[in-house]
Amino acid sequence: MRKLWAVSKLLRSKNVTSAPVETGQPLVAVIEDDCAARKAIGRLLRVGNYEPALFDCAEAFMTRPPQPSPACVIIDIQLPGLSGLDLQRQMRESGSRVPVIFTTANRDAAVRENACRQGCWAFFVKPSDGDALLAAVHSAVNRLSGSSEAS
């Protein structure tokens, strides 16, 4: 199994960029305060044929939401300011039904239980397996179509 950070190193060697561009691919927002992790997830998403929109905190995501609306959101639980769990709660309270995938370095079972209770699509402890993260994104993005084929 590939670890996300190893995948990032491989992708850097192939000059995969994380700069947002108009591609017509499903948009996936990434809210992650760790710059290296944020870029690594962005690169992984590009390889998986998704267009990443990268944010360093929940407040940046809330004040400059990506357009079009993301098909899925990947959120680090431990963010400066508003936490990932608080961001998900605010999204739900505002009527958003966008699937949320959480990532965290926190191995506490209570954190995982709380995230699952709030209705997260998937939950990953860092470092995340790149294949598993992409599979979770794919299933979240394709939740309405019922498609299980790769994009």
Image (cartoon, helix red, strand yellow):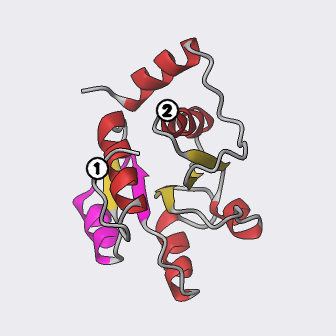
Q: Secondary structure at mark 2?
A: helix
- Quarter of the picture holding the C terminus: top left
In the figure, is residue 39 to the left or right of 84?
right
- Quarter-wise, where is residue 26 in the image? bottom right
> Looking at the image, which is closer to me, 63 or 48?
48
The residue that disc 1 covers is: 107
Residue 10, position as x, y percentages in the image: 47, 16
Q: Is residue 106 magenta?
A: yes
Residue 24, position as x, y percentages in the image: 63, 50
Looking at the rendered structure, the kind of residue marked 2 is Val
> Looking at the image, which is closer to me, 52 or 143?
143
> Looking at the image, which is closer to me, 48 or 96?
48
Closer to the N terminus: mark 2 or mark 1?
Answer: 2
Looking at the rendered structure, the kind of residue marked 1 is Arg
Above/below status of 5 relative to 142: above
Above/below status of 34 relative to 107: above
Q: Which residues are magenta?
A: 100-117
- Quarter-wise, where is residue 116 in the image? bottom left
The residue that disc 2 covers is: 47
> Could you tell me which residue is drawn at 27 percent across and 56 percent down?
108
- Quarter-wise, where is residue 99 in the image? bottom left
> Could you tell me which residue is drawn at 65 percent across and 28 percent down?
17
| Measured Cα–Cα span from mark 2 to mark 1 | 28 Å
Residue 6, position as x, y percentages in the image: 41, 21
Q: Secondary structure at mark 1?
A: loop
Q: Between label 2 and label 1, give the one nearer the viewer.
A: 2
Residue reaching furthest top? 13
In the figure, is residue 129 to the left or right of 33?
left
In the figure, is residue 70 to the left or right of 148?
right
Q: Is residue 79 magenta?
A: no
